[in-house]
Each structure stands twice: as structure tokens, then as C-alpha cells.
Amino acid sequence: MSEHAEVLNVKKTEGPQARARIKDLPRNVWAVGLTSFFMDISSEMVLNIVPLFLSNVLGVQTSIIGLIDGIAEAIASILKLFSGWLSDKTGGRKWLAVAGYALSALSKPFFYFASSWELIGGVRWADRVGKGIRTAPRDALVADSVTPKTRGLAFGFNRAMDKAGAVLGILIAALAVWLTQKSSIQLTKPTFQMIVLISLVPAFLAVLSLMIGARDVVVKGQRAAPKFSLRGMGKPFNTFLVIVGIFTLGNSADSFLVLRAQDLHVSVIGILVMLAMYNLIITLVATPAGSLSDRIGRRKLIIGGWLVYALIYFGFAFASQGWQVWLLYVTYGLYFGLAFGTTNAMVADLVPENLRGTAYGTYNATVGLLAFPASFIAGILWQGIGSWNGLGPSAPFLFGGMLALIAALLMAFWMPKKGALKGEASTD
């Protein structure tokens, strides 16, 4: 059965009272989910301990760690915009996504040889270039493969698969740490290098899963090369971008959450188990949350997720013991499970089918470009510069929590309540 026929089949099985089921999702959604599962096994094993390697082994300051993360996302952002537009122009989502995953997989072995923050940064940036190439075409491929009534479920399922891989990857890393250095507070270089080597296998399995399992979908509408125009995407989408941008400016890299845990004397093994539990919460929440957004609207789920985020960040600001950070980080998974996949689904609600790749590129570029100042500001605030002097590690979390509250209020009272397209699912 062709992928287009599978989409039609899903439509036929949807009655007015029917609730979409995971098993009814088409082949592409499963292929992308499996790819996300394998790549996150690989990425979460390594990327979560990169800030610890930078801090513990290389003695790098938090401002530099924030700079590395910020530049990584900024570099990827430009490519997300271009690759999304290119996938609209050519109609070829799959091979752009495969190329992006392949580049990320090929970059990972170089972490093994990195001995300075500049080299770590270079490898990190190459990995993000791969993410920049693949993200928008991959998300557009998922949106092309399902109907509006199953869009939230599809993106929630993809997020759940992604985070299930993260759970497994982090547990593998935790086992490696336990076998090599037990419950030490500081990460060692040999442990880091061993984890890098293990991560290579699932990285290449991710590439094979998408290469073999996915197919491009022909969607209605002409595949003329779209001109990039925010005005052409409509006011609801532009309003959505502004609100997401405000939230993102306070959403610094999770490296700072990891460093906050270590700052309060949580061991490396304790951090990895904490991260595994956090990702497990996302895995359990994301799919039912996505399905719920198909029935009650995206807005409510996003607002709820952002309010949870604000409370968690305020908790990080005032935490004084390691167990408090541990509990907060695990609960942080509720935000991700509720809001992240739902915002991805909302993008497709707001734009025409032939602009989906460009819209996902624009959305991801906005988030990625703002991740640079977000992480750099967080690093500076952590070191107690300017009007935040004296707050130390609490400052970036207070800043992020306040912006999340502002974004939630704007989503509640400024965001248009209906999708921009006739026949699309409501976004309220």
C-alpha cells in the first residue's frame, strides 16, 4: 500500500465519535518514530554529559558552555529554514531528513578525540547542522502523512518514541558511569570516551530506519517554489511565532539544569538517573497529550505546559538541596510532554499544505536563533553580572520562569482561537 493510500485509509476509519489509535498511524509516522528512538539513544548518551565533560575535565566556564549551546542552535536554525523551503520546492522530504541524520551520525565519533572546548564546540556544531537539515522536512513528512484529526497523536507519538530512546540511552550511559567510576561527583575523560563509542551503533541504526522505512507523500496543491514571506503565512502563524519566541528567550539549554544539579552535589550517576526519569515522564505523557490536543485544542495543552515550566523553573531558582533539583527535573518532563509535540502539531494547523516545510523551517529557525541569546544570557546571569548580581545560579531560572508566564498569558489572550485554514482543526 502506498503512503498516500495509507493516509486515505486513516481518513476512512475516522468516524465522528472515533478516537484515533496508535496502531492506525501510517508507515511514515512509525518510520520517523523508530528513527527518533535510535537517534535519541545515541544523542542522549553523549550530549547530556558534554557540559559535565566541559566543566569537570576541561574546566570551562558556564558562559562558554552557554555560548557553545547557543551557537549550535543558531547554526542549525538557518539550515532549518532553508531545508524546510527546499522540501516544499522539491516535494522531497525523506532524503533531506536522511542526509541530516547521516551527518549527525558521522560527527559523533569526533567527540572521542576532542580535547579542548573549541573542538567539542566544532563537533557539537556539526551535529546541529545535521539537525538543521533534517528537522523541518521530517516534521513536514509527518504532517503530510496524517489528517488534522490525528495530527496531535502523530506528533505526540513521535515525541514519545524520541524520549523512549532517551530513557534507554541515558540508562546505558548511567551503567557505563557506574561500571567505571561508581558514584563520583566528577565525570572522567575515559568514561566520556567509552560512552561516545557505544553511542555510534544506534546513531547509524537511526539513519537506516528512515532510509528503509519512510516514503515521500504527494499532497494536494502545486509544488511551486514558495517565496519566503511571513505575511503570506497569515496573522495566526505570525502571532504564534512571536509568542513562542518570547517563551524561547527564557528557555536556555538544559545544560544549565544539569549544572544546577551538580552545583547542589548530585553525582554523575544521580544526574543520569534523573535524566532517565525525566524522559520517561515525557514518554508516558506525550502520546495521550497529543491525542487530547486533537479533541480539546492545542492552546490549552500549550498553556498548561508553559505554566508547569514556569513553576519548575522557579523551583530550580529556590532549590537548596540535591533531592529538590532531582524531583524538579523529573517533574519538568510534564512540560515537555504536554507542550512540545503540541506546538509542532499547531504549526501545521496554521499554514497551507504546500507551505508546511517552510513553516516548520521558520518555526524551528525562530526557536533555534533565540536559543543562542537564551543560553548566553543564562550563562552570564549564572555568573552574577549586572542587575542580577548576587543571585548566582538562581538568576537564569527566575528569568526563564517569568518569560514562560508572559508567554502563557499571551497564548491565552492574544493567540487567535481558530486555525487559519478552512477545515483545519481548531487550535484553541
Image: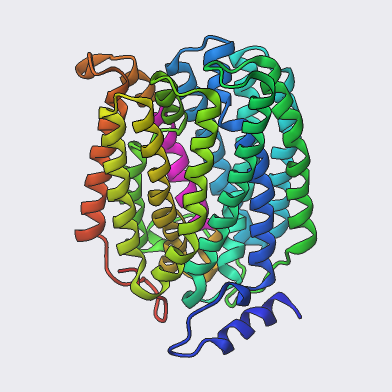
Image height check: is 166 above or below 59? below
Main secondary structure along the magenta-highlighted residues: helix
Task: Please tell me whether residue 359 is drawn above or below residue 296 in the rendered image.
Answer: above
Q: Position of residue 296 (x, y in %)?
A: 34, 73
In the rendered view of the protein, which quadrant contains the C terminus?
bottom left
The reply, left or right, for residue 297 in relation to residue 345 is left
Quarter-of-image position of residue 423:
bottom left
Specify the quadrant that holds the N terminus.
bottom right
Residue 362 lies in the magenta-colored region: yes
> Would you say 170 lies left or right of 185 here?
right
Q: Specify the segment rendered in magenta.
A: 358-375
> Does the rendering let one see residue 265?
yes
Q: Nearer the viewer, residue 45 or 353?
A: 45
Task: Please state the horizontal and vertical placement of residue 22, each as a whole percent of the image.
Answer: 58, 72
Q: Is residue 99 left or right of residue 134?
A: right
Residue occupying image coordinates x 70% and y 67%: 216
Q: Is residue 113 above or below residue 102?
A: above
Lateral position of residue 20 relative to residue 161, left or right: left
- The location of residue 244, given as percent across then percent down, is 35, 49
Magenta run includes residue 334? no
Tell me: residue 116, above or below residue 197. above
Q: Residue at x 62, y 68 (%)?
A: 223
Examine the rendering and report whether any part of residue 225 can be seen: no
Colour scheme in use: rainbow
- Please state the total of marks drawn on the protein image: 0
- Residue depicted at x 72% and y 35%: 199
User: x%, y% of residue 153?
Assistant: 50, 68
Based on the displayed image, in which of its 4 quarters is residue 29 positioned?
A: bottom right
- Residue at x-position 52% and y-position 54%: 283
Tell which of 356 and 318 is nearer to you: 318
